[in-house]
Image: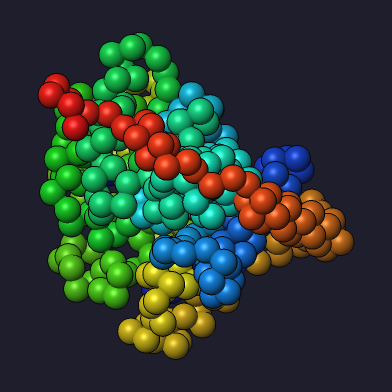
Amino acid sequence: MEITELDSDKVSKKVCALPERDKALGMYESMVRIRKYEEQIYYLFLEGRISGSIHQSHGQEACAVGMLYDSRVTDLMASTHRPAGHDLAKGVSLESMMCEMFGKANGCCHGKGGAMHTGDIGVGAIPANAIVGSNIPISVGMAYSCKMRRTDDVVVCFFGDGASNEGGFHEGLNGAAIWSLPVVFVCENNLYGASTHVETTMKVRTIAERGAAYGIPAERIDGNDVMAVNEAGARAIARARRGEGPTLLELMTYRIAGHSRSDASAYRPDEEEAAWQARDPIKLFRGRLIGEGLASAAELAAIDERVQGQVDKAVQLAEASPDPLPEDALRDVYAGEGGI
């Protein structure tokens, strides 16, 4: 098992090369789209224009984009109760996501999902599951289907550090290992399961080393470095496509906001928050693009402005979109033998 060490500040010492310009700018734009979408959602909740609750992923954009930017439409992705970044990175449209947040009929889940259950099977984004760790055995089942159908499609399964202590994590990894299934297990270790620090929930040094118990290769890398994630993801996905089985990736990252919109994060030390915010993944990538001459500050500012315009238009579309009809409550509902 390979574990790439991180220093005491959880920062990888390995520097991955930047890709060609078009891909680099595409990755930057995808990260900015996630950030601006989630910032807009936050303010819409504060203004009372949309209801419910939100579990945001801003600060973790490099994990989603790095893993999914090169994925095929036919590859599958399973998310968590914090799905916005994963869904947008996988190709779920910004407009359908925003409409879903307003509970509209043209939302990606027809207004039935809300913030914790977005997705679009048309682009391989399985509607998210808010039960912690439950998407892991589901991903194993989907990967088993890919193998039985003799495709070379791959399942990317995201989960948090807290889910690595669920029974489904261990059962899922064991099943995927013994059947050599094409699934990549991606743990976004943002240090906290809700308000509980990861160090108080396990005795092992890293989550990545748990892969050894199931004979699964694993890496622990900097989840705020989009190119480090992209490189590790490419290796794991290629391995799965070749029929060589699953990989466990532990991405060290940090959520900027609290666990949910009602969480002020009082349990997190100020110094810790400041250190991680200094390593904002978008700022890091922007700095590299400018510093290595792949883009100018003006070009990146233009991308920022264009994406904000897209978000603003999505809000306008959502507010003007139709509400679901009462009879829609019984559509897309399935029951076993004997009916509902």
| Quarter of the image with the N terminus in it | top left
Residue occupying the point 56% across, 40% down: 106
Q: In this view, does 264 lie above or below 283?
A: below
Q: Dividing the image into 4 quarters, which one contains the C terminus?
A: top left
- Image location (x, y in percent) of residue 277: 54, 75
Is residue 170 toward the left or the right of residue 186 in the image?
Answer: left
Q: How is the image coloured?
A: rainbow
- Point out residue 63 in the picture as x, y percentages from the top left corner: 49, 52
x 46%, y 80%: residue: 273
Q: In this view, does 197 lie to the left or right of 16?
A: left
Q: In this rendering, does residue 79 appear at all? A: no
Which of 337/23 is in front? 337
The image position of residue 59, as x and y in percent, is 52, 65
Q: Which of 18 and 264 is in front in this view?
A: 264
Residue drawn at 51 percent across, 54 percent down: 101
Residue drawn at x 29%, y 59% is 161
| Residue found at the far top of this picture | 150
Residue 205, placed above or below residue 179: below
- Residue lying farthest to the front in this orientation: 326
Along the line of sight, the residue nearer the viewer: 4 or 65: 65
Q: Can residue 168 be seen in this view?
A: yes
Q: Where is residue 14 in the image (x, y as percent from the top left)?
A: 52, 56
Taking 307 as reference, is 89 above or below it? above
Number of numbered tags placed on the structure image = 0
